[in-house]
């Protein structure tokens, strides 16, 4: 033990000393330990060692420093004179030498920093990021999972709409595609804005973020196009539910690329829309889509971390799980404004409390006008209250399983035979459309308002590169109601009124119904 | 390599020269011998001991011998040091210098009694 301590202390000496005498010093220490036993000799030994360290360390370092100075010619012993010592005074360097050394080191530092700045300077990236910022909102929410998106807790009221949009991205498949509704969604992407901003960009990016830019080299664009197309083909062939259709779509993508059909794509979003169209033209599968995201897509599409989950939980608590309003309106009509279908694990009690509050209503209105989607599990939980027997709810995202039936009847629930109204708007998306579509098809609810967004999000999301991803259906559940679901076309209302008037209309309908 | 200062000769270096005047010793032997000849007043720690040895080696006042075992201390091989003729001369001249000092001191009645 004490030898180890001393070995550590020895490391304080300069290396030349340790190399030459370290082993011997340790040996000497061992000998002393061996011979000097008893309390007093031991104390004296350690006292000796520390005074020795205090005295010899500075001396050794002075010597080590001096030995770094240029060696002067060895002083010759004058012959005949019995021994004499020549101690070379440690000459300090001349001021001129110091000045030159200083200038040299400063210029070396400057040169190094200049070099490193050149090698890390990537102005293009930032420039084109700015360019796409205007269009980022719809497409970037494609892959985000709810917990990640909950990083900004939604404020009640105005912000709740975006909260709903965020939570809506938490589809099991993660495949939310606001770009899916085709024209209606693309119209949200201001192309004027694109053409303006494209002038600000001097060069195309090299990561598949493709755009036509004045003066940009065509081959760079083509190469970026090609990488995205190749990645899309690889993913289709690997994951698409129907192998034959996958090959047809791949062939179509290849053919269009060869024909130069993609060259006209002015923006990343336009290119993505074009590829989506090419695939749908062949497969007639509206669940296939390819999206462009201005925000870099996470790689890999990671499971949310516990911190993200905690943020999501906090955001949900703050917003009452996006149950914005739960109230009994005149004539005993229950009103539930729900802005997303949040994670059941987090919000189940909130949902049950809300339904319990409305349990004695004579009719119930679900206001989904600001609901951008969420978790199928929450759809099933709420729908369970509307039936007195397990009911099959078609969900294009999941293969038919026991989870496809509602867990009805709910004990103590009185809503199973009450009339139901669902308010919709153009921005009713995804899980909210799932809820609306199935209740409409089951003739369990009257849909009042506008045709919904048409975001089926039935594909499993696959990341192609930093900015492109695609939703690929990997399952094909049976749709008992019709061939097509709400993908792209949306859910048409039973009573078509502008979204702002939907509540008024539904209230009138409900009152009439209740009075009967 | 600059030389270490040995002029004036440090007490430790002089004691080492004196210790080696009798026989070749290894480091621990030198330390014991020095302690003995100073009646325990000077116990050379490893740092002082080996830096002095280094200086003396550089000045060719002592020399290294091949490592060998010390039968009294077990089977570890130890490096032995031997006084060179230059070292012996220096020790003698240092002793003469001290003797001169002593004579002066005695003449000045600083010393009690005739030790030298």
Image (cartoon, coloured by chain):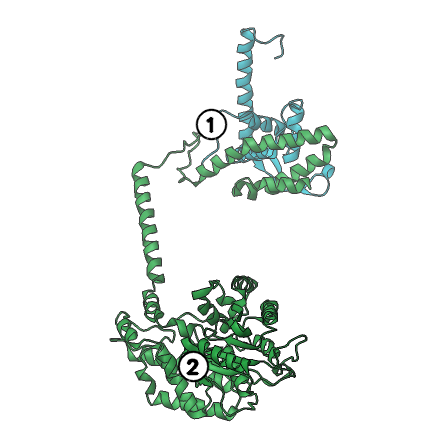
Chain colours: A green, B cyan
Q: Nearer the viewer, residue A199 or A354?
A: A354
Marks 1 and 2, the one that precedes in the sequence: 1
Q: Are marks 1 and 2 in contact (CB under 8 Å)?
A: no
Quarter holding the C terminus of chain B? top right
For mark 2, give the secondary structure: loop
Residue in the image at 43% along x and 66% along y: A158
Any part of residue A293 in sight: no
For mark 1, give the secondary structure: loop
Q: Is residue A266 left or right of residue A141?
A: left
Q: Nearer the viewer, residue A283 or B107?
A: A283
Q: Which residue is mark 2?
A: A450
Chain identifier of the residue bearing label 1 in the image = A
Percent coordinates x, y for residue A491 in the rendering: 47, 84
Q: Which mark is residue A282?
A: none
Circle 1: is it few (<14), some (14-19), or many (20+) Cα within 10 Å?
few
Percent coordinates x, y for residue A495 in the rendering: 45, 84
Chain identifier of the residue bearing label 2 in the image = A
Based on the displayed image, in which of its 4 quarters is residue A488 positioned?
bottom left
Q: Which residue is mark 1?
A: A84
Quarter holding the N terminus of chain B? top left
């Amino acid at each position: 033990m004490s030898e180890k301590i001393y070995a550590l202390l020895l490391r304080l000496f300069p290396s030349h000393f340790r190399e030459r005498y370290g082993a011997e010093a340790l040996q000497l220490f061992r000998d002393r330990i061996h011979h000097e036993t008893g309390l007093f000799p031991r104390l004296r030994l350690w006292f000796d060692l520390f005074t020795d360290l205090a005295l010899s360390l500075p001396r050794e370092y002075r010597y080590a420093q001096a030995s770094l100075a240029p060696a002067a010619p060895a002083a010759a012993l004058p012959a005949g004179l019995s021994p004499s010592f020549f101690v070379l005074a440690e000459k300090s360097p001349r001021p001129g030498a110091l000045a030159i050394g200083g200038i040299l080191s400063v210029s070396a530092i400057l040169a190094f920093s200049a070099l490193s700045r050149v090698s890390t300077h990537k102005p293009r990236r930032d420039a084109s990021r700015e360019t796409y910022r205007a269009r980022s909102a719809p497409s970037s929410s494609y892959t985000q999972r709810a917990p990640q998106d909950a990083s900004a807790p939604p404020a009640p009221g105005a912000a709740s709409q975006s909260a709903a949009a965020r939570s809506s991205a938490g589809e099991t498949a993660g495949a939310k595609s606001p770009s899916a509704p085709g024209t209606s969604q693309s119209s949200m992407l201001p192309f004027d804005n694109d053409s303006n901003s494209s002038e600000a960009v001097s060069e195309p990016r090299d990561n598949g973020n493709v755009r036509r830019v004045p003066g940009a080299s065509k081959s760079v664009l083509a190469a970026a196009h090609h990488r995205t197309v190749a990645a899309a083909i690889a993913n289709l062939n690997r994951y698409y539910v129907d192998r034959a259709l996958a090959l047809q779509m791949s062939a179509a993508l290849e053919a269009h690329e060869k024909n130069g059909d993609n060259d006209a794509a002015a923006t990343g979003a336009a290119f993505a829309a074009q590829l989506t169209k090419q695939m749908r033209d062949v497969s007639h599968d509206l669940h296939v889509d390819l999206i462009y995201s201005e925000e870099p897509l996470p790689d890999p599409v990671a499971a949310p971390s516990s911190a993200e989950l905690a943020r999501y939980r906090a955001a949900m608590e703050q917003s009452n799980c996006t149950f914005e309003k739960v109230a009994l309106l005149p004539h005993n009509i229950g009103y539930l404004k729900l802005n997303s279908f949040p994670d059941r694990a987090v919000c189940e009690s909130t949902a049950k409390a809300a339904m319990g509050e409305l349990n004695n209503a004579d009719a119930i209105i679900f206001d989904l006008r600001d609901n951008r989607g969420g978790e199928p599990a929450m759809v099933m939980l709420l729908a369970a209250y509307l039936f007195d027997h397990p009911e099959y709810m078609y969900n294009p995202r999941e293969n038919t399983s026991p989870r496809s039936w509602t867990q009805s009847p709910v004990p103590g629930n009185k809503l199973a035979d009450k009339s139901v109204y669902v308010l919709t708007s153009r921005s009713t998306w995804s899980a909210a459309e799932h809820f609306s579509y199935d209740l409409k098809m089951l003739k369990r609810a009257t849909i009042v308002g506008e045709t919904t967004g048409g975001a089926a999000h039935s594909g499993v999301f696959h990341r192609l590169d930093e900015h492109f991803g695609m939703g690929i259906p990997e399952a094909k559940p049976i749709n008992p109601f019709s061939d097509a679901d709400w993908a792209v076309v949306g859910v048409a209302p039973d009573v078509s009124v502008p979204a702002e008037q939907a509540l008024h209309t539904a209230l009138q309908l409900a009152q009439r119904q209740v009075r009967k | 390599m600059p030389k270490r200062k040995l002029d004036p000769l440090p007490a430790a270096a002089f004691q080492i020269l004196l210790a080696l005047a009798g026989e070749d010793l290894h480091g621990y032997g030198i330390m014991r011998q020095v302690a003995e000849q100073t009646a325990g007043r000077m116990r050379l720690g490893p740092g002082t001991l080996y830096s002095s040895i280094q200086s003396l080696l550089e000045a060719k006042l002592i020399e290294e011998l091949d490592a060998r075992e010390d039968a009294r201390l077990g089977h570890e091989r130890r490096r032995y040091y031997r006084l060179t003729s230059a070292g012996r001369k220096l020790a003698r001249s240092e002793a003469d210098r001290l003797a001169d000092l002593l004579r002066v001191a005695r003449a000045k009645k600083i010393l009690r009694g005739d030790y030298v």
